[in-house]
């Protein structure tokens, strides 16, 4: 694969049928949902916060939090998305900044990180199985979790991890782990009030967990990788302090690659880049790349990120949605973006908060703190990790025929080709055209030989060899 910005020597194409190269393009907005009746938070002026999603009974839903509660937006037909249900938070109003969500076995778990002395927050568990007809809150109590900044469910082990959590009137804990094998009856397994395995941790902001191995984004305490197989005796596999890696700040959140070999994380600190660590040996992790949204503003700042197959989806505050191709983890390439806000970057927190790319349709959900839910059209069949470049080209259904030819040939595609360039074997441009879907080209004037057709389609640049014989 030839990366953007590198010299292309077309004679090398003699050894390849084609190549693909993703290019940064603006995503296509299918719908933007907002509710003008909602009030904003007093501290940051945000109406909305986290976004999540799920599919059930043939319907796709977006879940977006607000100062008032949890909104269920039916996005099955994204151009006509609508709010089907709303669940008011146990605590609601302008003091609310954060909500967080995760689903498990047909239930949605919802928490908030704020409440007041009178208006207490809670853990809400919502039964989704009867959608689209109805939803039901089957658990709403502060006994187990009153407030939590974030939650994550390790579905392989039926465990819920609550970060920066309080339950009932108990003191704060950086981390608690609950057994949710009975989904509506969470059982506390362990609370880490006084640190983890002898390491003092004042705060766990977020976490990613798979098969009991947790990647703890611990704010100014850095990043920890911990084996929680035995919750009573966790084992710290690695601990990165802020002084251990470049572009460090407030270690905010991250996501593991599908193969489990790389961890992508962000420091919620203005002007810092995102990081990629090789974690194939979790006891000896190695920095392999840093990257950003390509904005030179000192106030550019990432927030949340999710990996889906070979792509990293990031809600990047002022820079909106940012999508990176991570087929080569050492060289993430920005391929798609969507600006959810027009606000000028400052030393505040505004713009894209959360992202969710796992809907079966492939459409991408993004929440913006001020502007609500954005539904961005899928840009490719991106969740096919075993797909070869040949399969991708086959999916795009590009056909050049006849080939070889005498100078007259057709190019057909199911999707619009944005640009077509024809190069000779020396790399000289001999022809260029604009947009088309099906078109016949007559080039009887050019000499016989091997040529290369460069086709820009969707987010890909595809090169096919054309042989002209006379």
Image (tube, grey):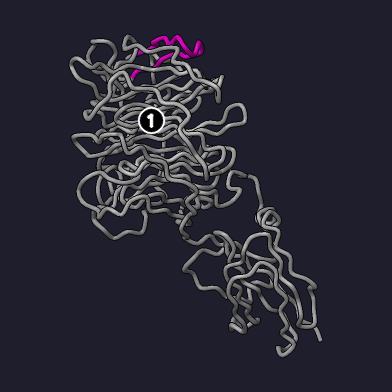
Q: Quadrant of residue 188?
A: top left
Q: How many marks?
A: 1
Residue 457 visible to the viewer: yes
Magenta stretch, residue numbers: 176-190
Q: What secondary structure is found at the residue carrying circle 1?
A: strand
Q: Would residue 207 be found to the left or right of residue 379 on screen?
A: left
Q: Residue sitting at 73 percent across and 83 percent down?
A: 442
Near-viewer residue (241 or 259): 259
> Is 421 located above or below residue 330 in the figure?
below
Residue furthest front as drawn: 37
Residue 20 colored magenta?
Answer: no
Give the quadrant of the C terminus: bottom right
Residue 147, percent from left and from top: 29, 20
Residue 460, percent from left and from top: 57, 61
Q: Would residue 201 be found to the left or right of residue 469 on screen?
A: left
Near-viewer residue (37 or 47): 37
> Is 170 located above or below residue 260 in the figure?
above
Q: Would residue 116 be found to the left or right of residue 90 on screen?
A: left
Near-viewer residue (25 or 58): 58
Q: Quadrant of residue 342?
A: bottom left
Give the quadrant of the N terminus: bottom right
Residue 88, percent from left and from top: 35, 22
Residue 179 colored magenta?
Answer: yes
Classify mark 1: residues with Cα within 10 Å, few (<14), some (14-19) or many (20+).
many
Residue 309, percent from left and from top: 55, 43
Give the residue pinned by disc 1: 207
Q: Residue sitting at 33 percent across and 32 percent down?
A: 66
> Is 161 located above or below residue 60 in the figure?
above
Q: Residue sitting at 41 percent across and 27 percent down?
A: 101
Residue 280 visible to the viewer: no
């Amino acid at each position: 694969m030839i990366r953007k910005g590198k010299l292309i020597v077309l004679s090398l194409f003699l050894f390849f049928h084609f190549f693909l190269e993703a290019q940064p393009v603006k995503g296509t907005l299918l719908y933007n949902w907002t509710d003008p009746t909602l009030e904003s938070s007093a501290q940051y002026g945000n109406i909305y916060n986290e976004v999540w999603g799920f599919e059930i009974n043939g319907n796709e839903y977006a879940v977006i939090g607000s100062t008032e509660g949890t909104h269920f937006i039916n996005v099955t037909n994204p151009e006509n998305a609508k709010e089907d249900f709303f669940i008011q938070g146990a605590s609601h109003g302008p003091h609310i900044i954060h909500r967080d969500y995760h689903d498990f076995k047909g239930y949605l778990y919802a928490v908030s990180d704020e409440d007041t002395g009178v208006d207490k927050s809670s853990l809400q568990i919502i039964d989704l199985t009867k959608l689209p007809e109805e939803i039901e809150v089957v658990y709403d109590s502060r006994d187990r979790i009153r407030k939590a900044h974030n939650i994550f469910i390790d579905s392989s082990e039926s465990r819920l991890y609550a970060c920066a959590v309080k339950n009932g009137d108990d003191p704060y804990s950086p981390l608690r782990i609950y057994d949710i094998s009975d989904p509506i009856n969470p059982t506390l397994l362990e609370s880490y009030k006084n640190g983890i395995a002898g390491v003092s941790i004042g705060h766990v902001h977020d976490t990613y967990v798979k098969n009991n191995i947790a990647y703890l984004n611990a704010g100014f305490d850095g990043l920890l990788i911990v084996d929680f197989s035995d919750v009573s005796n966790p084992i710290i596999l690695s601990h990165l302090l802020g002084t251990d890696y470049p572009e460090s700040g407030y270690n905010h959140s991250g996501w593991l690659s599908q193969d489990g070999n790389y961890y992508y994380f962000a420091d919620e600190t203005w002007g810092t880049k995102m990081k990629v660590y090789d974690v194939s040996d979790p006891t000896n992790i190695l920095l392999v790349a840093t990257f950003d949204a390509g904005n030179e503003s000192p106030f550019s700042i990432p927030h949340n990120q999710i990996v889906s197959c070979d792509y990293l989806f990031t809600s990047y505050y002022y820079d909106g949605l940012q999508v990176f191709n991570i087929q080569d983890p050492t060289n993430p390439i920005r391929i798609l973006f969507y600006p959810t806000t027009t606000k000028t970057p400052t030393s505040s927190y505004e713009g894209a908060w959360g992202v969710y790319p796992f809907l079966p349709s492939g459409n991408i959900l993004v929440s913006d703190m001020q502007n609500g839910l954005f539904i961005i059209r899928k840009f490719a069949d991106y969740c096919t990790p075993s797909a070869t470049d040949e399969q991708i080209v086959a999916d795009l259904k590009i056909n050049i025929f006849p080939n070889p030819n005498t100078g007259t040939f057709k190019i057909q595609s199911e999707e619009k080709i944005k640009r077509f360039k024809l190069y000779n074997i020396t790399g000289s441009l001999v022809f260029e055209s604009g947009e088309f879907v099906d078109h016949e080209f007559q080039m009887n004037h050019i000499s016989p030989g091997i040529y290369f057709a460069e086709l820009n389609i969707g987010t890909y640049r595809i090169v096919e060899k054309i042989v002209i014989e006379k």
